[in-house]
Amino acid sequence: MTEMGQTVALYMQGTGEALLLLVVSGALSVLIGLGFMLLDIGGNRFNGAVIRIYSWLAQTTPPLILLFLAFYGSTWAGWNVSPMVAAIAAFTFFAAAYYYEIFRAAYEGVPVGQAEAARALGIPYWSFVRSVLLPQVLRIASGPLIGRTTVLFKETSLASAISTAEIMSVANGRIYAGGNPLVHVLIAGAIYATINIVLIRIERRLSAKVTSP
């Protein structure tokens, strides 16, 4: 294989690793964020306080610190965790707090009268949540969720700090092997930009559907 062919193959592999990190951590974060929102609105003040403390802590801690804690902390504890697993754990912990806030804001956008009407009609609370509340929350939150996911994808570049074989890790490897730094930074930037353009277009379409009458 020629050097160019090897470079292309490495960047394709790195892009696949970055997308895997995005999809897995993003899916877990959405599920956890949604679960936290449901626990928060359930009326238990202790649960709400704990979730808000977690959200504050996750949002105020730099992602790079969380990556180091997940990777080196697990090694210190005697766990044999791969860089990818550590990165997924760190980004899930980090992003779930933001998704929780998005779901919480979407919940507050649902008219209060619907819950009151459900109580008046004797509809069980969780039946109301499942059939009426959640579809509206997901619809309102869809645009901001994609918007936050574009940010999450850009943040996955930090995973190269713990040797996760994603796009920036490939770029760094090619630079250390004697490649032109500017060329490889531009290649990595172009890959991130292309994928983010797709995500931004999805966000705009979803936002347009939500705001349209």
Image (cartoon, rainbow, N blue to C red):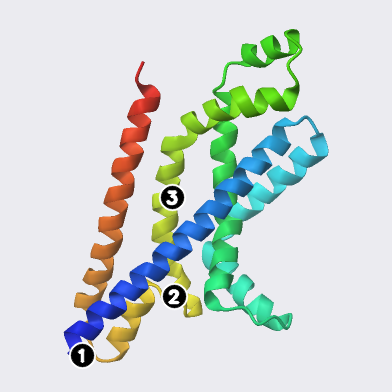
For mark 1, what is the residue? 1
* Label 1 CA crowd tier, 10 Å (few <14, some 14–19, many 20+): few
Of the image marks 1 and 2, the number of the one nearer the N terminus: 1
Using the rendered view, name the quadrant where residue 170 is placed: bottom left
At 58% from the left and 16% from the top, the residue drawn is 111
Type of residue at label 3? Thr
Residue 125 in the image: state x and y as whole percent: 74, 23
For mark 2, what is the residue? 160
Tell me, for residue 149, which label it has, or none.
3
* Label 2 CA crowd tier, 10 Å (few <14, some 14–19, many 20+): many
Q: CA distance from mark 1 to mark 2?
A: 25 Å
Tag 1 and tag 3, C-beta contact below 8 Å: no
30, above or below 116, in the image? below
Count of labels in the image: 3
Foreground disc of the pair 1, 3 = 1
Residue 145 in the image: state x and y as whole percent: 46, 42
Of the image marks 1 and 3, the number of the one nearer the N terminus: 1
* Kind of element beneath mark 1: loop
Q: Nearer the viewer, residue 11 or 94?
A: 11
Type of residue at label 1? Met
Residue 87 in the image: state x and y as whole percent: 54, 69
